[in-house]
Image: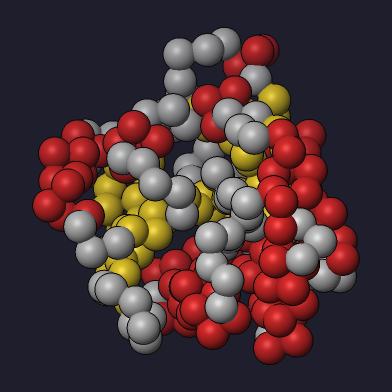
Amino acid sequence: MEEFSRKYFELLTTEYAGINLTRINEYSEFEVKQIHDSIVPYEESTVFKSYVDKLAINVDIGFGGGFPILPLAKILPNNKFVGIETRNKKCVVVAEIAEKLGLTNLSFIHSRIEDVLIDRPCVCTFKAVGKVNDFLSKINTTESIVVFFYKGPGFYEQESDQLELAKKNWDVIENLELNVPGTEKRLIIGFKNKSVLRGTKSTKQLVKLSSIL
């Protein structure tokens, strides 16, 4: 993992420095806040790990510079990963970086989550800034799925209302404080849909996850 992490950092800060995929310019900080922060839920949450291992399909929404999708794909070579990103340039560049890092278990799509139909049981991850229920309400699915959010220390102060709204359609399956040395408190919050959900669009208008895998 050390070699992977250093090569990733080098690519982001040299060849792809102009794309602004990370604001971090010190390797030690990058290793903690991007690499370790991406994989620590798998290492410390038995709930997250059990679903990731069982379902073996991971969908990462709004991956930005490739987090947590690339570090997770590195430690889980037998799982399939799909990245969904609204910014096409970042989608193309992260796909290139994944190839240069030797990762072969990933696919990427330039799209919004509300334009994708999740038609396979899977684990969805969000590490992007945004409100929990706002994201959950945009998901279109015909399956029972689980969704995990990587959150910072202000989650309960800022999103208590969002959590209550989400509980109408989703069960909370994980709520764990994570140990990420050198950072503020980190949380992993997990949800499972109570019933099969559908968004506002006809499924005929949506890109199917099964067609991307």
Marker count (numbered): 0
Give above or below for 78 relative to 151. Answer: below
Q: Position of residue 162 (x, y in %)?
A: 21, 39
Work out whether residue 119 can be spotted. no
Q: Position of residue 96 (x, y in %)?
A: 84, 54
Pick whichever, 90 or 78, lies toward us: 90
Image quarter where the C terminus lies is: top right
Give above or below for 41 relative to 173. Answer: below
Image quarter where the N terminus lies is: bottom right
Give above or below for 7 relative to 164. Answer: below
Image quadrant assignment for residue 31: bottom right
Kindly identify the residue that appears in the image at 34 percent across and 77 percent down: 183
Kindly identify the residue that appears in the image at 58 percent across and 50 percent down: 63
Give above or below for 78 relative to 3. Answer: above
Left/right of residue 172 with respect to residue 160 in the rendered view: right
Q: Position of residue 169 (x, y in %)?
A: 28, 35
Left/right of residue 207 with respect to residue 107 in the rendered view: left
Image quadrant assignment for residue 110: top right
Kindly identify the residue that appears in the image at 32 percent across and 42 percent down: 132
Kindly identify the residue that appears in the image at 64 percent across and 70 percent down: 71
Work out whether residue 92 can be spotted. yes
Left/right of residue 96 with respect to residue 31 in the rendered view: right
